[in-house]
Amino acid sequence: MASPLPFRHLLVPIDGSELSDAAVQQAVALAGALAARITFFHAQESFYGRPDMAIFGEGLAVDPKVGEQFAKASAVWTEELLTKARAVATAVGLESDAATSVDPVVYEAILRVASERACDLIVMASHGRRGLAGLLLGSETQRVLTHAPIPVLVVPGRPQQG
């Protein structure tokens, strides 16, 4: 007696790195095998940064044109990333869609989109940072893992030892 496949809609957060590209390849292969839908997502960084680590203090005079230029460049780059990821899916006959948002807290944006789009699996890369680098730079993947109400498949950032 066959049971329904467990994952029907994959969310794939991407950041433009080679590791992210590898996660796209893995997610597309998995979506194809499961006949699942796939949504690619990129969280655009806020010019003003994370609210808990703001670089710019309140009342600091910053030329609004700088923020506008940053936002425009980020939107163009994001569109290129999402188009490239969708092309990988299209090349193997999968339909996909894409989403983006400007958000200073990336892991929260990922989880929000997963919920809004009714995704049941998140597939994302891990940069494999450990030690001080992992502590200082943080890990969006780690944050998603510890806060996600749905399963997360992590594509490792370093080759697996066999």
Image (cartoon, helix red, strand yellow):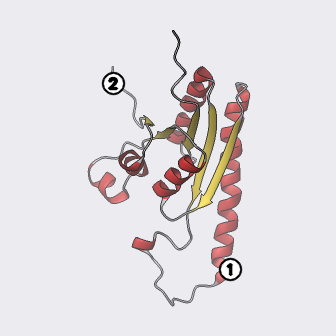
Query: Image point 63% across, 54% down: which residue?
Result: 100
Q: Residues within 10 Å of mark 2 (few under 14, many from 20)?
A: few
Query: Is 22 in front, or is 105?
Result: 105
Q: In the image as oriented, which residue stretches furthest toward the left? A: 131
Q: Secondary structure at mark 2?
A: loop
Q: Horizontally, is 91 left or right of 127 in the view?
A: right
* Residue type, label 2: Gln
Q: CA distance from mark 1 to mark 2?
A: 49 Å
| Amino acid type assigned to the residue bearing label 1 in the image | Lys
Label 1 environment density (alpha carbons within 10 Å; few <14, some 14–19, many ≥20) = few
Place of residue 54 in the rendered image (x, y in percent of width and height, measured from the top left): 44, 75
Q: Quadrant of residue 102?
A: bottom right
Quadrant holding the C terminus: top left
Vertical comparison of 34 with 114: above or below: above
Residue depicted at x 56% and y 32%: 27
Mark with earlier residue (1, 2): 1
Q: As displayed, is residue 136 above or below residue 20? A: below
- Give x and y (percent) for residue 90: 73, 31
- Name the spot of residue 17 as percent of width and height, x first: 54, 45
Residue 142 in percent (x, y) is at 37, 48
The residue that mark 1 highlights is 65
Residue under the point 35% across and 46% down: 129
Q: Which mark is residue 161?
A: 2
Mark 1 lies on a secondary structure that is helix
The answer to whether 62 is drawn above or below residue 151 in the figure is below
Q: Which mark is residue 144?
A: none
Q: Are marks 1 and 2 in contact (CB under 8 Å)?
A: no
| The furthest residue to the front | 1
Outermost top residue: 1
Residue at 58% in and 23% down = 34
All told, the count of numbered labels is 2
